[in-house]
């Protein structure tokens, strides 16, 4: 009898000493994470987090990786990943985890009206970014803002979550779909939540979206082409109002009715104006759109003695018909003999780059975004062509940010003015309710 008791004690002792290993092995092998010999894409992450007791499967032995994760469950995962383990609350199991999340400033106390619903991707981004902030230094605002131009549906992100989404992209905590979209209001699946948690714990698993560095685009590809290659195309007349004979030595010569010969813009106000005009038109030319470029001399004085200064105009339109009717997506005016009263020399007018109406005439959701991201790229290249890579990139980003902000605000008719100096260029912004205007003063 004594031998049986001793044997039983030894068996129990062995079971107890091996329990953690067995628990890890049996609970991490969820039967729905490997089907017909094919493992779920997030299986390794899920297994590791189950072993760490950060997440768990269902009583039936499944994990249900594609099910949406609820707010309380996600908060619990993040809080536990930060090393905080609590017993479940008596009245509501998640109370201790929610209280800790509020204490750590992962969430605000009144952020959710209920924790028993699925969490959205933008909400999840905020929680994980706030958690990341407790572990390491977050990227600077300048670094974060670069990502506005690489998130196609940035405009759809709720205002209170925009910065968190950008940080999630910048740090690689959350990535977009195959097209780079963030899909802010979509649900976060249990598998995606596990992936995010693992990226919080293991920096090597993060996948920040690449942002093109200045060194990689020191010269725009279009500017590397010879003038003959660009303006010598057989169908150049379908793409621009300029012809090959009007391009000489990297400058544009404009036809003007009062002159026997084509004219250059005057360089006394801005010595780089002709190079800027040449490069601007060159980067805009494409088979799918039309670039109209023309010159107008200073007008005669009107009744009040005001004379319109001479200028060169470059407009980017859908086709020649639109261009001739002065309908463009955006256009530039370069003053060449005297600036405006405020000293401004170049004006950019942004028009129809945003969806407003559906085919049936009903209004689009104002947050739908660009008509086509190609216009954002063309706008970027046009600004860089004028102001150069270093300052042009920053000026474009400033314009882009204002454009997104203005077009996502419902009170777009309200006049707004802003000013910022970037390098040797002072940028003034004005929204008159019909279009967005940017004025450039070169110091």
Image (cartoon, rainbow, N blue to C red):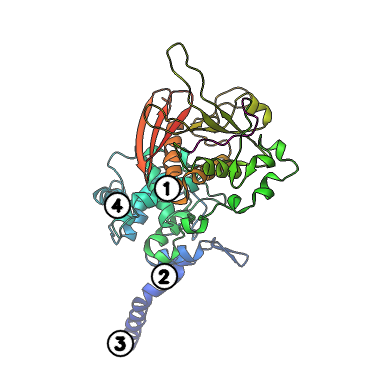
Q: Position of residue 436 (x, y in %)?
A: 46, 29
Per the image, the residue denoted by label 3 is 2
Choose top left, top right, bottom left or bottom right for residue 80.
bottom left
Q: Residues within 10 Å of mark 1 (few under 14, many from 20)?
A: some
Per the image, the residue denoted by label 2 is 24
Q: In front of the other: label 2 or label 1?
A: 1
Per the image, the residue denoted by label 4 is 97
Q: Residues within 10 Å of mark 3 (few under 14, many from 20)?
A: few
Per the picture, the main secondary structure of the magenta-coloured stretch is loop
Q: Are marks 4 and 2 in contact (CB under 8 Å)?
A: no
Q: In front of the other: label 4 or label 1?
A: 1
Nearer the N terminus, badge 1 or badge 3?
3
Q: Position of residue 95 (x, y in %)?
A: 28, 48
| Range of residues picked out in magenta | 258-267
Residue farthest front in this picture? 260
Relative height, residue 268 to residue 165 (above, below): above
Question: Left of 161 or right of it: where is 333?
Answer: right
Nearer the N terminus, badge 3 or badge 4?
3
Residue farthest bottom in this picture? 3
Q: Can you see residue 33?
A: yes
Q: Secondary structure at mark 3?
A: helix
Nearer the N terminus, badge 4 or badge 2?
2
Q: Secondary structure at mark 4?
A: helix
How much space separates mark 3 and mark 2, taking CA atoms? 34 Å
Per the image, the residue denoted by label 1 is 391
Q: Position of residue 102 (x, y in %)?
A: 26, 47
Q: Residues within 10 Å of mark 2 (few under 14, many from 20)?
A: some
Q: Residues within 10 Å of mark 4 (few under 14, many from 20)?
A: many
Q: In front of the other: label 3 or label 4?
A: 4
Nearer the N terminus, badge 4 or badge 1?
4
How much space separates mark 2 and mark 1, taking CA atoms? 55 Å
């Amino acid at each position: 009898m004594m031998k049986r008791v001793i044997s039983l004690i030894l068996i129990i002792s062995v079971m107890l000493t091996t329990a953690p290993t067995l628990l890890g092995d049996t609970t991490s092998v969820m039967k729905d994470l490997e089907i017909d010999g094919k493992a779920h894409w997030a299986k390794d992450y899920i297994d590791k987090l189950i072993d760490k007791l950060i997440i768990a499967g269902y009583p039936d032995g499944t994990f249900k990786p594609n099910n949406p994760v609820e707010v309380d469950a996600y908060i619990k995962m993040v809080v536990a990943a930060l090393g905080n383990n609590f017993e479940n609350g008596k009245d509501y199991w998640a109370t201790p985890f929610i209280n800790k999340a509020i204490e750590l400033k992962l969430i605000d106390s009144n952020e959710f009206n209920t924790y028993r619903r699925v969490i959205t991707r933008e909400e999840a981004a905020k929680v994980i970014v706030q958690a990341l902030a407790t572990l390491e230094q977050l990227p600077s605002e300048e670094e974060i803002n670069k990502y506005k131009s690489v998130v196609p549906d940035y405009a759809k992100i709720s205002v209170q979550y925009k910065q968190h989404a950008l940080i999630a992209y910048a740090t690689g905590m959350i990535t977009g779909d195959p097209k780079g979209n963030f899909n802010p209001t979509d649900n976060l699946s249990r598998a995606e939540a596990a992936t995010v948690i693992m990226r919080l714990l293991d920096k090597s698993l993060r996948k920040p979206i690449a942002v093109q560095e200045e060194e990689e685009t020191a010269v725009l590809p279009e500017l590397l082409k010879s003038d003959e290659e660009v303006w010598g195309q057989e169908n150049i007349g379908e793409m621009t109002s300029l012809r090959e004979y009007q391009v000489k030595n990297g400058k544009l010569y404009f036809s003007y009715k009062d002159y026997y010969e084509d004219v250059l813009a005057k360089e006394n106000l801005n010595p780089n104006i002709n190079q800027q005009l040449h490069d601007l038109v060159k980067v805009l030319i494409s088979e799918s759109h039309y670039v109209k470029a023309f010159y107008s001399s200073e007008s005669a004085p009107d009744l009040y003695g005001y004379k319109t200064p001479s200028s060169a105009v470059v407009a980017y339109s859908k086709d020649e018909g639109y261009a001739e009717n002065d309908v463009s997506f955006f256009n530039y005016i370069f003053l060449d003999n005297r600036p405006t009263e405020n000293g401004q020399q170049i004006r950019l007018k942004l028009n129809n780059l945003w969806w407003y109406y559906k085919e049936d005439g009903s209004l689009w959701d104002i947050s739908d975004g660009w008509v086509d991201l190609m216009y954002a790229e063309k706008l970027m290249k046009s600004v860089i062509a004028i102001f150069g890579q270093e300052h042009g990139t920053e000026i474009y980003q400033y314009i882009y940010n204002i454009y997104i902000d203005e077009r996502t605000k419902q009170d777009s008719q309200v006049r707004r003015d802003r000013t910022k100096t970037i390098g040797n260029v002072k940028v003034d912004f004005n929204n008159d309710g019909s279009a967005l205007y940017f004025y450039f003063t070169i110091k």
